[in-house]
Amino acid sequence: MRPAWSLRAIAVLFAAILPLSGCALTTGHVDLTYEPMAETTKVARPNSPHVTVEVLDKRPTQAVGQKINGLGMKSADIVPNSDVPALLKSAFETELSNRGFSEGTGGNTILVRLGNFQNQYKLGLISGEATASMGMEVSVIRADGSVAYKRYIRSERNDWVEITGEDNAQRMLNAAMRDAVAMVFNDHAFIEAVTKS
């Protein structure tokens, strides 16, 4: 017969994994921000059409993650203090403005369908891992309704963490959003579609 785990061994195990979980029972809050891309170039032409950005939130939940307890089980939600679709819209508008495009109706519409924006934790033996991802479909629609560009964008950022709390989720979520927006604006086909009418 195998010996049962001693109380001391169980206490040592919990002491090792408990710091990873932080305060897993209370709702976590994150302050999401967008940091514009550095060293952008004006690419809009004198005759480039105005642009309008619309973001449709298709996510199944407004939470951007869940905490986990010391045993790796999901617990309290992590929610943003800001409006995620509004932040994403502002990010697109900032990048467009930095490239010389003017906001206005009657030109091209950039339609963003946000399908996923989540951070997930994975608990290891000694440390944990935070993985944030963003998924969105980006389209450029002409004034006549024709679609000049459509692409599904997915970004992912991960890093090891010592505590599976709000700060690490916030860091990874902000990084995933920056990467997703950068993938769009580094796509020559997207820039070409926005530049023309």
Image (cartoon, rainbow, N blue to C red):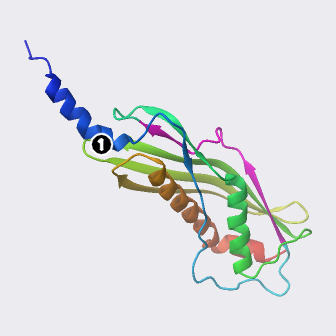
Observer able to see residue 51: yes
Snapshot quadrant of residue 49? bottom right
Q: Position of residue 88 (x, y in %)?
A: 68, 59
Q: Position of residue 118 (x, y in %)?
A: 55, 47
30 and 153: which one is in front?
30
User: Is 181 left, or right, of 90 in this rendering?
Assistant: left
- Of the 4 image quadrants, the one containing the C terminus is bottom right
Q: Secondary structure at mark 1?
A: loop
Q: Main secondary structure of the magenta part?
A: strand
**Residue neighbourhood size for the residue with mark 1, other residues' Cα within 10 Å, grouped as few (<14), some (14–19), many (≥20):** some
Amino acid type of the residue that numbered disc 1 sits on in the rendered structure: Gly
Q: Is residue 67 in the magenta section?
A: yes
| Residue at horizontal 66 percent and vertical 43 percent from the top | 59
User: Is 192 left, or right, of 48 in this rendering?
Assistant: left
User: Is 143 left, or right, of 15 in this rendering?
Assistant: right
| Residue at horizontal 85 percent and vertical 74 percent from the top | 50
9 and 95: which one is in front?
9
Task: Establish if 87 lies above or below 62.
Answer: below
Snapshot quadrant of residue 187? bottom right
Task: Establish if 39 lies above or below 13.
Answer: below
User: Is 154 left, or right, of 100 in this rendering?
Assistant: left
Observer able to see residue 123: no
Q: Which residue is mark 1?
A: 124
134 and 21: which one is in front?
21
Q: Is residue 132 in the magenta section?
A: no
Q: Residue furthest top?
A: 1
- Of the 4 image quadrants, the one containing the N terminus is top left
| Residue at horizontal 13 percent and vertical 17 percent from the top | 4
Q: Position of residue 196 (x, y in %)?
A: 80, 76
Region in magenta: 51-68
| Residue at horizontal 39 percent and vertical 34 percent from the top | 69
Task: Establish if 132 lies above or below 106.
Answer: above
